Amino acid sequence: CILGSVDAEPSGTQTSSSRRRNMQAIRARNTKPELRLRRELHRRGMRFRINVPVPGMPRRSMDVAWSGKRIAVFIDGCYWHECLDHSSIPKVNAEYWAPKIERNRQRDEETDGYLRAQGWVVLRFWEHESVEDGRNRAVCAFSNVSLCRTPRPVSAARTVVTWRKHGADEH
């Protein structure tokens, strides 16, 4: 188990109380991949804001942002955002988890499209990507923000370039 010892029933499944404890312990902010990337960016002298609310989209926030340059960074967990290399739908309660994880992916696309329509550059990284790759892409975007921004008609908001290594370059 990721979070330490688990109370198990004889069948090998977690009890409701232990599952609840595990789920409550999962961080939404300040995850290890976020902290590593932020530490690297800070080491390079880059100052940024963290957990910045997405303007006009309640209950959504950018993991790292440079509001003045309109650059948003998201570090996505492989499980919660369905990384093609590492994710898998659990066998227990799959009818609950599959739509939930799909909705997370849809929400990511909606957020990306919305921010790009507002003139933001959106960078998305998987939690398993190297810190150096993330840092280099963020530094490149920060230094060349005008090259990263491509004017798009609002109707083409679903056609967005992603910075994820896995999957197609365009949706």
Image (tube, grey):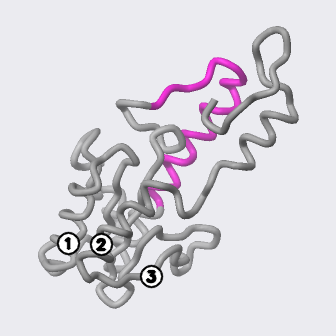
Q: Nearer the viewer, residue 62 or 132?
A: 132
First along the sequence among labels 3 and 2: 2
Picture residue at 80% right of the left edge, 9% below the top: 11
- Looking at numbered disc 1 in the image, what kind of residue is underneath it? Val
| Marks 3 and 1, how far apart at CA | 15 Å
Magenta region's main secondary structure?
Answer: helix
Across and down, in percent, residue 6 comes to: 75, 28
**Residue at the image point whose x is 60% and y is 58% from the top:** 28
Distance between the Cα atoms at labels 1 and 2?
8 Å
The correct choice, above or below, for 118 with respect to 9 in the image is below
> Secondary structure under badge 2?
helix
Viewer-nearest residue: 94 or 64: 64
- Do the residues bearing badges 1 and 2 touch, measured as CB atoms within 8 Å? yes
- x, y (%) of residue 14? 78, 24
Residue type at tag 2: Leu
Write down the residue under mark 1. Answer: 139
Say which quadrant the N terminus sits in. Answer: top right
Q: Which residue is mark 2?
A: 41
**Residue at left 38%, top 69%?**
38
Q: Is residue 155 magenta?
A: no
In-image side of 103 versus 126 (left or right): right
On the image, the x and y values in percent for residue 23 come to 72, 43
Range drawn in magenta: 87-110
Q: Residue 21 is drawn in which quadrant?
A: top right
Which residue is label 3 attached to? 49
The furthest residue to the bottom: 68
Residue 65: x %, y % from top left: 40, 77
Spatial CA span between label 3 and label 2: 12 Å
Mark 1 or 2, closer to the camera: 2
